[in-house]
């Protein structure tokens, strides 16, 4: 497949030591070479692959030096895209890097679309679709654990397992074909039924093993939507600031200070939290505060984890009880804050309301109890099971949905065999399972989906 040559800035915009303009395509070396003046008249078209060269980028029109650069030359197919790749390392800064990019585009390259370098790696067979998606997961990883998941997927751990399952199904389908072609042999039919049950149950079990890891994997990839709720002035904003370790929210003794939902990402013991500090839930005549309270109630319904904050120095109120009722059936950690003040709250009643939920006491003013809270969050969702380094698990919502479809399809195949359904009908469900698994790695996927997936990537990747 011959594609045009693309170019983009591959480093974040802004000031820095180095910025990189990347080119990929059959004309990449020729285009960069037309702008590059190396020491001693060195030409990029003559240099060895995977080497870097010092020189200057010249403006072809004025012949003036546009930038002092180091140019990396990497010839396909031993590159990320399997095409010729050039990386022009120039000084970091908006003006310098954009000047180099503009000269490259004027020389014949096309500005790359978001994710187009990775898309070419996929189209050229360098990586499969699940590995391509892992590239963006790696970029967006907010914890070491999330990064390790993405690295494992980039290395092809999930791909190899999916390919193995598809091969098992393919071999089973071949035996089914023998049965269809030679129906007169009774022993072949009996052997085929036994093989179908054995292989289908194996595939089903492997899919179930992957799905068991999906909750943890999805949390690592997307973050845990965590909502801090409670009455006004119980310490919700202080809790946000303590977890973020920065004064993101205004803290005062005046109830109703927080009027809107404040969002912040934080890493708690390897668990990425999308932390939402909400307006205190109470009845109020203040129009602005009332809007904030309604927004608090809305995000409450969409949360993965609730941090319910109470005041150690206040009695439980009807509003507190109503909040407990609002979070019934959800994952909740109850935090009794302000233990530096004299106790007024009835802790026994709190324990009754909390039921099986974890209860933590804190004094955020004195930084007491925060470690216990972080440990409670980590143990609630991971409980140490995510530490297995050899575990293959899924974190992508698209993969999880496809695995659920494949699981349903293989169950239908098993039910069909057990019910004595003709083999050629069972074959349809097996083939469908094979096709669904293929969509995970991109062997059987629509072009429109590929375009949509890569459009979510950052420019230059």
Image (cartoon, rainbow, N blue to C red):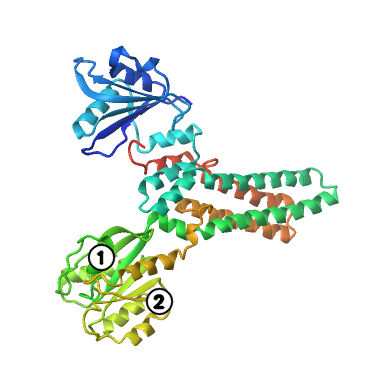
Indicate the position of residue 427 as horizontal and vertical percent values. 68, 49
Task: Give the structural element (helix, strand or loop) at label 1.
Answer: helix
325 or 48: nearer the viewer: 48
- Few, some or many residues within 10 Å of mark 1 (<14, 14–19, 20+): some
Label 1 and label 2: CA atoms lie apart by 22 Å
Cβ–Cβ under 8 Å for marks 1 and 2:
no
Mark 1 or 2, which is nearer the eye?
1
157 or 111: nearer the viewer: 157
Left or right side of 140 for 394: right
Q: Which residue is drawn at 39% across and 69% down?
A: 376
Indicate the position of residue 446 as horizontal and vertical percent values. 49, 41
Left or right side of 360 for 291: left
The vertical placement of 230 against 459, above or below, is below
Indicate the position of residue 365 as horizontal and vertical percent values. 21, 71
The vertical placement of 307 against 192, above or below, is below
Instruction: Of the two numbered discs 1 and 2 on the same chain, state the one appearing first in sequence.
Output: 1
Q: Which residue is drawn at 37% across and 41% down?
A: 455
Residue 338, by quadrant, is: bottom left
The vertical placement of 385 against 171, above or below, is below
The vertical placement of 44 against 182, above or below, is above
- Few, some or many residues within 10 Å of mark 2 (<14, 14–19, 20+): some
Any mark on residue 355, and which?
none
Residue 317, by quadrant, is: bottom left
Task: Give the structural element (helix, strand or loop) at label 2.
Answer: loop
143 or 59: nearer the viewer: 143
Any mark on residue 242, and which?
1
Q: How many labels does the image show?
A: 2
Left or right side of 398 for 406: right
Give the farthest residue toward the top. 41
Q: Please name the residue that numbered disc 2 is placed on.
A: 357
Q: Quadrant of the C terminus?
A: top left
Indicate the position of residue 134 as horizontal and vertical percent values. 44, 45
């Amino acid at each position: 497949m011959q594609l045009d040559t693309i170019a983009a800035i591959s480093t974040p915009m802004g000031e820095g030591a180095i910025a990189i303009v990347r080119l990929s395509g059959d004309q990449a070396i020729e285009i960069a070479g037309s702008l590059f003046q190396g020491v001693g008249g060195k030409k990029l078209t003559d240099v060895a692959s995977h080497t870097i060269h010092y020189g200057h980028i010249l403006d072809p029109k004025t012949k003036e030096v546009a930038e002092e650069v180091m140019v990396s030359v990497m010839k396909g197919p031993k590159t990320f895209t399997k095409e010729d790749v050039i990386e022009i390392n120039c000084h970091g800064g908006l003006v310098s890097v954009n000047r180099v990019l503009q000269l490259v585009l004027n020389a014949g390259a096309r500005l790359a679309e978001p994710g187009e370098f990775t898309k070419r790696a996929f189209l050229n067979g360098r990586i499969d679709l699940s590995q391509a998606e892992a590239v963006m997961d790696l970029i967006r990883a907010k914890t070491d654990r999330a990064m390790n998941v993405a690295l494992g997927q980039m290395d092809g751990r999930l791909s190899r397992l999916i390919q193995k399952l598809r091969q098992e199904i393919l071999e089973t389908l071949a035996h089914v074909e023998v049965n269809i072609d030679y129906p007169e042999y009774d022993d072949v039919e009996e052997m085929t039924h036994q093989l179908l049950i054995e292989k289908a149950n194996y595939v089903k079990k492997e899919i179930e093993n992957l799905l068991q890891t999906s909750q943890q994997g999805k949390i690592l990839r997307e973050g845990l939507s965590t909502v801090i709720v409670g009455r006004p002035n119980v310490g919700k904003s202080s809790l946000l600031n303590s977890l973020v370790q920065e004064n993101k929210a205004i803290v005062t003794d005046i109830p109703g200070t927080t009027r809107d939902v404040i969002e912040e990402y934080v890493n708690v013991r390897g668990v990425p939290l999308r932390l939402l500090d909400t307006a205190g839930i109470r009845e109020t005549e203040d129009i602005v505060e009332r809007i904030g309270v309604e927004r608090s109630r809305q995000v409450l319904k969409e949360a993965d984890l609730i941090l319910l904050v109470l005041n150690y120095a206040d009695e439980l109120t009807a509003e507190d009880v109503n909040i407990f009722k609002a979070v019934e059936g959800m994952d909740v950690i109850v935090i009794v804050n302000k233990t530096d003040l004299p106790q007024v709250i009835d802790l026994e009643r709190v324990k009754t309301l909390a039921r099986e939920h974890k209860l933590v006491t804190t004094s955020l003013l004195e930084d007491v109890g925060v470690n216990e809270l972080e440990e409670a969050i980590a143990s609630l969702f991971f409980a140490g099971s995510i530490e297995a380094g050899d575990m293959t698990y899924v974190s992508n919502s698209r993969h999880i949905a496809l695995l659920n479809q494949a699981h349903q399809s293989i169950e239908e195949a098993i039910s069909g065999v057990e019910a004595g359904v003709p083999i050629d009908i069972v074959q349809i469900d097996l083939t469908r399972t094979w096709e669904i698994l293929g969509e995970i790695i991109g062997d059987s996927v629509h072009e429109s989906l590929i375009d949509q997936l890569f459009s979510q990537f950052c420019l230059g990747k």
